[in-house]
Image (spheres, rainbow, N blue to C red):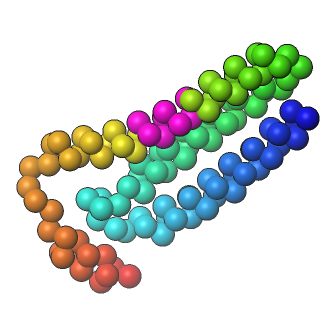
Amino acid sequence: YWKVFVTIIVAWHLVLMLMASYLCYLTRNISSQFAESKYLAISLFSNLQITVLSIPVLIIVGADPSTSLFIRAVVIWINDFAVLGIIFGNLMYSVHTRKAEINIGAAVLRFATSQ
């Protein structure tokens, strides 16, 4: 049943990545101080790379349950760690290196008038 599992997981990931890419596209004009669409897009691309690279490996080791379990666990860990590192690493960096306070009203007004 591992082929069914891989097919369902890959299909679900592709649907989620397409939805997230669309949302990143919609929020591309929001001020970079508030929008993380660039880093979400990088995370999505990383997610796609990990998924594409893990499929052949899972197919190769599909018959061995212990190896397959290990590969799936490693793929999930790498995927989650990469997404968290890209998104929250950038947030932590921007919080600790911020020089001036953010003018929220001006940023919201710029976004509202750009629509």
How many badges with numbers are in the image?
0
Nearer to the camera, 96 or 109: 96
99 vs 77, left or right, is: left
Q: Is residue 11 in sight in this rendering?
A: yes
Name above or below for residue 66 compared with residue 28.
Answer: above
Name above or below for residue 103 compared with residue 15.
Answer: below
Residue at screen point 14% across, 68% down: 103
Quarter of the image holding residue 113?
Answer: bottom left
47 vs 87, left or right, is: right
Task: Identify the magenta region.
Answer: 78-85
Residue at screen point 78% across, 16% down: 66
Residue at screen point 27% across, 42% down: 92
Name above or below for residue 11 compared with residue 54.
Answer: below
Residue 82 painted magenta = yes
Nearer to the camera, 23 or 91: 91
Name above or below for residue 62 compared with residue 25.
Answer: above
In the rendering, at what x and y percent does residue 11 appear?
A: 76, 50
Furthest-left residue in this view: 100
| Quadrant showing the N terminus | top right
In the rendering, at what x and y percent does residue 18 appear?
A: 63, 58
Q: Is residue 57 in sight in this rendering?
A: no
Residue 50 painted magenta = no
Quarter of the image holding residue 84?
Answer: top left
| Quadrant showing the C terminus | bottom left
In the rendering, at what x and y percent does residue 63 appear?
A: 89, 20
Residue at screen point 65% across, 26% down: 73
In the rendering, at what x and y percent does residue 14 appear?
A: 69, 51
For the stretch drawn in magenta, the main secondary structure is helix
35 vs 13, left or right, is: left
